[in-house]
Image (cartoon, rainbow, N blue to C red):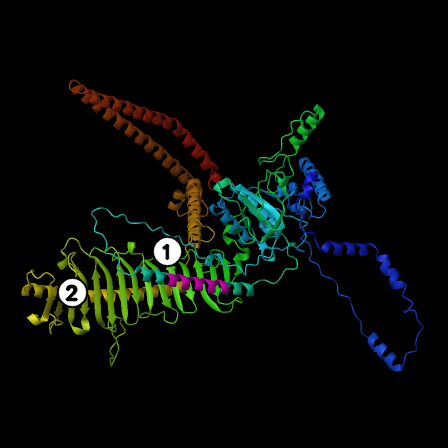
């Protein structure tokens, strides 16, 4: 520390120090109070006065009242068992002791130079009441989970996994700093412990991260987000598409001239701009009034609340710009954030820096060039940041050899010792549980966010976002639920409590390719208002959208071979029927009054033959056709048919007259339709109408099946479990246990069969409990005879294979002698290869046969010895 640094920032002085000093003086001189109590003033030592009987009675009544001073309950400190920790937690290595001494010297110089600044957070106590430097508490770790590789995933995990423990009192530094391993086990920590854990993960992932010790607002220190908008509700920045000016070529047809008055257009635009400016001004005034009403009450400890957060510097991991991370919430803030009021120091796993800049305006305008000694005073000379030092050409000349050796010796030993913390490990179960006990609730501005661990809820709910109209969270407006691992592929449900509409979103993979489903909570049944979106790429019919109401149904299609893209159906009221009712859906279906079908242009047909719109007026017994418009025409050709009176009779001959068909042809030179063509067209249209009705009934049935499936899925709420998840997959666990049981039984059975060589022979005689002498000799002879036969059979089998290979080789050799003259080189090479392989097989068979002949007598004698030593036969031999 240099004397010139004294002109730096004077940090806020603790206002409570004077009160604490007076209290310490009073506690240090308790005799003054005792003397004052034993020596009352002269007024108290006046002459005694006689008391009246009423006063005596009152005195006696008051004497009956006894008051006991209550004991002050204090929060007990957390006590750990030192035996549960390794030696690195309980003792300091020589290098650590040297670093602590150097840090103490650094602290003394700092206190001497800056008496009005807060003490530095250098060497707090750990779990075992051992002083440790804060930099050595950082344990750089890279875990195996992909989500923790990026800063936002790691910050969200730390914010969700731990429970906040505020500093008490908020204006003093904590006495202890637990290791990240202990913090993870307890799932609780202060802001310094949050930051230490997060920095350990970020440095392990390759970020240039530092723990910051400074001052923040009350809302940041208490993680109060009730005045912040929920991140899930923030609208994404709309990207404005650049308007590309169309280039007009020389021979292109120019657009028609704009004949509107330019003055009127200018005045209209000016009027719109004035209205927009007034609306923006009114909106800003309303926002200012609302912000003034929602402004938090003044904080008496503003600027004194100690807090710790994380600084990520640009450079590593392609970070373009430095930023802050709030460990309590996992949100990022710019370096100019007004919620942070000042910085005392910061550190990482290699060095410790003290801020020498002015923080009277918070952190605005601060420089984070840690190599600039005028703005950041570092503790250890092994600074990895490039230093900005003024060269002194005479400095090295006045150093003698002893001083140079001393400097070299100091620099050689004063580097940061390794971390004393155990390796950080997070099990898969803890990583998936995330929040303490799997649940966590966060409150935002007019919103509440509930987070749950995966598989904690039977329906797969992982988070629920509730939006309210008021700040007190009483008037509910919207609820969004997010799901994971559901068998029905549901991942989001949005319920608008104002309108009563519910929208469900699904992943691909459902049986009917449903993508979105919007319906009213008051009418979830069929034939009610609803909207369905589908994954049209996975459907054969290309259905994209279906709108349904009690009287209408509209369907939209994409990429169909028949160029159909729109369907509309209008339903009528069901007629009242008397007598027994048929419960089937088709028998009691809504009558169809009107059907409309629209088609895209088919380039393979001429425009006057390509149907653009087909209308079935079922209630009026009419059919209307509208064709596509030709490029050089302004109107389209149309046709209309009136259905015959007996059109619905099966097998009846349809009669058609000229007044049953009307047509309008754009081209006056085109030939009129012949009556036969009109008759055939009418027959095709009647068939098409029947098919269209069938498709309508199929659509109604599909809607009914989808709703039935949704009801069944909500009742069962089955979740997908990976086959690799051995803890939750009960089916796989049962199957694995069953396979293990069968394998054990098979292994035991084989062992028993291999060991009990008398089992088949004992089964022939009924497996008696006691074996007679004659039976014993018979079992011995049978067992040895069986072994002898098996040995002979094996020898004969090897012999037969040997002879077969020999005969094949002889045949091949005789064939070679007969055809040797006319053979080609390829045939000769093939013959030589065959002979080589055949001789190899014959040699192997010969070796096996000789070895079998040698081993057979030994096997026979070994079995005879086993039979004589068998406890079931030993008494007879």
Of the pair 859 and 23, the residue shown nearer to us: 23
Residue 139 marker: none
Residue 115 in the image: x percent, y percent? Answer: 72, 46
Mark sitting earlier along the chain (1/2)? 1
Residue 71 drawn above or below residue 822: below
Stretch in magenta: 270-285
Mark 1 neighbour density, 10 Å: few (under 14) some (14–19) many (20 or more): some
Residue 792 drawn above or below residue 875: above
Residue 103 in the image: x percent, y percent? Answer: 69, 40
Q: Which residue is mark 2?
A: 625
Pick out the residue farthest to the top.
821
Of the pair 717 and 21, the residue shown nearer to us: 21
Tell me if residue 309 is in the magenta stretch: no
Distance from the alpha carbon under mark 1 to that under mark 2: 39 Å
Q: Nearer the viewer, mark 1 or mark 2?
A: 2
Tell me if residue 271 is in the magenta stretch: yes
Q: Which corner quadrant holds the N terminus?
A: top right
Q: Is residue 840 left or right of residue 416?
A: left
Element type at marker 2? strand
- Kindly indicate whether the residue at mark 2 contacts the one at mark 1 (C-beta within 8 angstroms): no
Q: Quadrant of residue 295?
A: bottom right
Q: Which residue is mark 1?
A: 507
Residue 628 drawn above or below residue 805: below
Residue 392 in the image: x percent, y percent? Answer: 65, 29
Q: Residue at x 85, y 77 (%)?
A: 60
| Residue 657 seen | no
Of the pair 305 and 731, the residue shown nearer to us: 305
Residue 169 in the image: x percent, y percent? Answer: 68, 56
Q: Quadrant of residue 539?
A: bottom left
Q: Quadrant of residue 659?
A: bottom left
Q: Residue at x 9, y 71 (%)?
A: 660
Element type at marker 1? loop
């Amino acid at each position: 520390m240099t004397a010139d640094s004294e002109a730096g920032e004077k940090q806020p002085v603790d206002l409570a120090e004077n009160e604490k000093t007076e209290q310490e003086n009073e506690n240090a001189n308790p005799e003054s109070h005792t003397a004052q109590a034993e020596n009352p003033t002269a007024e108290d030592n006046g002459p005694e006065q006689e008391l009246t009987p009423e006063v005596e009675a009152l005195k006696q009544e008051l004497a009956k009242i006894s008051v006991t001073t209550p004991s002050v309950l204090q929060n007990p400190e957390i006590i750990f068992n030192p035996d549960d920790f390794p030696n690195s937690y309980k003792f300091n290595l020589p290098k650590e002791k040297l670093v602590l001494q150097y840090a103490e010297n650094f602290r003394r110089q700092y206190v001497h130079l800056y008496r009005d600044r807060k003490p530095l957070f250098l060497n707090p106590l750990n779990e075992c009441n051992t002083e440790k430097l804060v930099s050595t508490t950082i344990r750089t770790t890279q875990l195996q989970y992909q989500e923790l590789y990026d800063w936002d995933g790691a910050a969200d995990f730390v914010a969700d996994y731990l429970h906040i423990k505020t500093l008490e009192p908020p204006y003093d530094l904590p006495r202890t700093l637990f290791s990240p391993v202990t913090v993870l086990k307890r799932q609780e920590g202060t802001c310094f412990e949050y930051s230490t854990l997060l920095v350990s993960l970020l440095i392990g992932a390759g970020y240039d991260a530092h723990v910051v010790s400074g001052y923040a607002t009350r809302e940041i220190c208490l993680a109060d987000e009730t005045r912040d908008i929920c991140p899930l509700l923030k609208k994404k920045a709309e990207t404005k598409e650049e308007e590309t000016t169309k280039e007009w070529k020389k021979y292109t047809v120019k657009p028609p001239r704009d004949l509107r008055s330019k003055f009127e257009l200018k005045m209209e635009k000016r009027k719109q701009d004035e209205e927009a400016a007034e609306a923006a001004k009114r909106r800003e005034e309303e926002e200012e009034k609302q912000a003034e009403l929602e402004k938090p009450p003044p904080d008496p400890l503003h600027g004194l609340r100690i807090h710790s957060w994380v600084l990520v510097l640009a450079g590593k991991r392609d970070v373009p710009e430095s930023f802050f991370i709030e460990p309590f919430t996992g949100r990022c803030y710019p370096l100019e954030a007004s919620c942070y009021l000042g910085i005392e120091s910061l550190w990482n796993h290699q060095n410790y820096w003290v801020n020498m800049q002015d923080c009277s305006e918070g952190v605005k305008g601060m420089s984070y060039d840690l190599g600039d000694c005028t703005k950041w005073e570092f503790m250890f000379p092994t600074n990895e940041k490039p230093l900005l030092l003024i060269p002194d050409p005479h400095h090295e000349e006045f150093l003698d050899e002893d001083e140079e050796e001393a400097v070299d010796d100091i620099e050689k030993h004063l580097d940061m010792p390794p971390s004393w913390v155990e390796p950080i490990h997070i099990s898969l179960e803890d990583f998936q549980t995330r929040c303490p006990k799997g649940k966590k609730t966060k409150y935002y501005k007019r919103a509440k966010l509930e987070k749950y661990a995966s598989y904690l809820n039977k329906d797969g709910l992982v988070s629920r976002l509730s939006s309210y109209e008021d700040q007190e969270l009483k008037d509910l407006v919207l609820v969004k639920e997010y799901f994971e691992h559901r068998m029905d592929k549901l991942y989001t449900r949005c319920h608008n409590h104002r309108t009563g509409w519910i929208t469900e979103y699904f992943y691909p993979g459902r049986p009917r390719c449903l993508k979105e489903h919007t319906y009213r909570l008051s009418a979830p049944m069929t034939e009610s208002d609803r909207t369905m979106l589908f994954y049209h790429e996975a459907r054969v019919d290309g259905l994209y959208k279906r709108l349904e109401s009690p009287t209408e149904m509209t369907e939209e299609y994409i990429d169909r071979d028949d160029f159909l893209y729109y369907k509309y159906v209008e339903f009528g009221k069901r007629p009242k029927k008397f007598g027994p009712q048929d419960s089937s859906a088709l028998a009691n279906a809504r009558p169809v009054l009107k059907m409309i079908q629209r088609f895209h242009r088919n380039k393979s047909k001429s425009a006057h033959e390509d149907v653009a719109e087909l209308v079935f007026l079922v209630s009026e017994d009419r059919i209307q056709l509208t064709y596509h418009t030709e490029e050089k025409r302004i109107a389209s050709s149309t046709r209309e048919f009136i259905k015959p009176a007996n059109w619905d009779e099966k097998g009846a001959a349809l009669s058609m007259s000229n007044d049953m068909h009307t047509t309008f042809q754009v081209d006056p030179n085109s030939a009129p339709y012949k009556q036969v063509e009109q008759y055939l067209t009418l027959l095709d249209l009647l068939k098409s109408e029947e098919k269209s009705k069938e498709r309508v009934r199929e659509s109604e049935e599909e809607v009914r099946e989808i709703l039935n499936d949704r009801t069944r899925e909500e009742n069962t709420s089955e979740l997908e479990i990976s086959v690799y998840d051995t803890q939750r997959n009960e089916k796989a666990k049962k199957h694995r246990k069953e396979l293990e049981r069968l394998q054990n039984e098979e292994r035991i059975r084989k062992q028993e069969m291999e060991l009990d060589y008398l089992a088949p022979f004992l089964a022939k005689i009924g497996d008696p409990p006691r074996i007679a002498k004659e039976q014993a000799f018979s079992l011995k002879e049978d067992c040895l005879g069986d072994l002898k036969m098996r040995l002979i059979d094996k020898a004969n089998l090897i012999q037969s294979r040997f002879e077969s290979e020999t005969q094949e080789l002889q045949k091949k050799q005789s064939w070679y002698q007969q055809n040797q003259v006319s053979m080609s080189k390829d045939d000769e090479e093939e013959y030589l290869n065959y002979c080589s392989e055949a001789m190899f097989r014959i040699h192997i068979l010969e070796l096996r046969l000789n070895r079998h002949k040698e081993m057979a007598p030994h096997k026979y004698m070994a079995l005879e010895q086993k039979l004589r030593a068998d406890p079931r036969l030993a008494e007879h031999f």
